[in-house]
Image (cartoon, grey):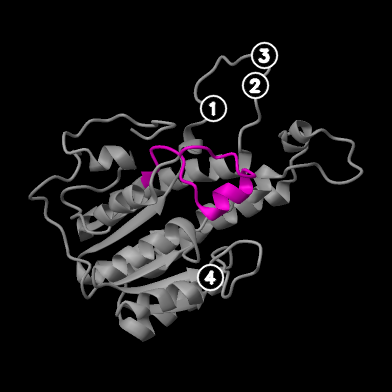
Amino acid sequence: MTPAREGTRRVSPGGRVAIVTGASRGIGRAVAQRLASSGACVVVAARTVTSDGRLEGSIREVEQSIRDLGGNALAVACDVADPSACAELVTAAREAYGPIDILVNNAALTVPDRRSKPEAGSGLSPREALSIVNFPIDEYRRAFEVNLFGAYRLVQLVAPDMIRRGRGNIVNISSDAAQSPGDGPYPQTPGVPLHGYATSKAALEHLTRTVAYELSRHHVSVNAVVPSSPIATPGAVFASRGQIGDSLPMARFVDAVALLCAVSADERTGTVAHSEDLLDPTGRRRGWLGDPYL
């Protein structure tokens, strides 16, 4: 499918009900604020209810920032790895605002893949600790619980609303890590890929297509968007210990997410696209741009 262009049929966010996960800071916060500024009633979901001192931002702060500008927002604490918490989130959203029109699955877990040092007394180097030989399976599983199964459960919960209404938008936030390290052969001294994070994001991209395929007859648009280059979110800066470098402006990425939150399923569904490709009026496909973003 071609990128949305001038004249593409879109549904205004005004009056619609959106759930945004991982919305206490970074991408989720910016997306929630953008949707609210466009008139949507936004349910701001994340685990961080109040600032924990390690990273700035909380769902209460985002909720208040939206309300201060006259928007509609509700903060709901939710660990998306917990299916019961997902159910409570959707129930709270419906009770506050009605049926769900938009779901943005942004919550993600990266830190276990980026441990700066091995466990004390392990005798392992940092690279050895991150190796598939030594990386703990419970941490690997946790990445899937957050990055994949949380999205899966929330889609299950909101899809009935969208099916009944004959419209809806589901946007999954993916990562270029899902395509790394790419096809071999590889150098003799390769780095260590982000096992749990990258593999769960690759699975999320496949989930995007399978859900889009099933829901297409109900005119529900389901897509995934990948940042075209790194975004210096608080979580990414923390995980990389400040080594993220030049990055894609947050507003550019949010533009791409907002487009997918409004596009008709007849125009775009079942796609996994880089953000700058979505925004390019000529429809060019450039994929991962690295640093800088243009």
For the magenta stretch, what is the residue range?
225-246
Q: In this view, which residue lies farthest toward the bottom?
A: 95
Viewer-nearest residue: 138 or 30: 30
**Comparing marks 4 and 2, which lies closer to the viewer?**
4
- Dot 2: what SS? loop
Q: Secondary structure at mark 1?
A: loop
Report the Cα–Cα distance between label 4 and label 2.
Answer: 38 Å
Q: Which residue is mark 1?
A: 181
Q: Residue at x 62, y 14 (%)?
A: 187
Q: Are marks 1 and 4 in contact (CB under 8 Å)?
A: no
With 197 as the anchor, is 168 left or right in this view? left
Amino acid type for the residue under numbered disc 4: Ser
Q: Quadrant of the C terminus?
A: top left
Circles 2 and 1: CB atoms closer than 8 Å: yes
Residue 70 vs 5, above or below: the answer is below
Say what amino acid the circle numbered 1 marks: Pro
The quadrant where residue 2 appears:
top left
Camera-side residue: 159 or 205? 205
Q: Is residue 35 left or right of residue 234?
A: left
Tag 3 residue:
188
The picture places residue 255, in percent across and down from the top left corner, at: 28, 52
Badge 1 or badge 4: first in the primary sequence: 4
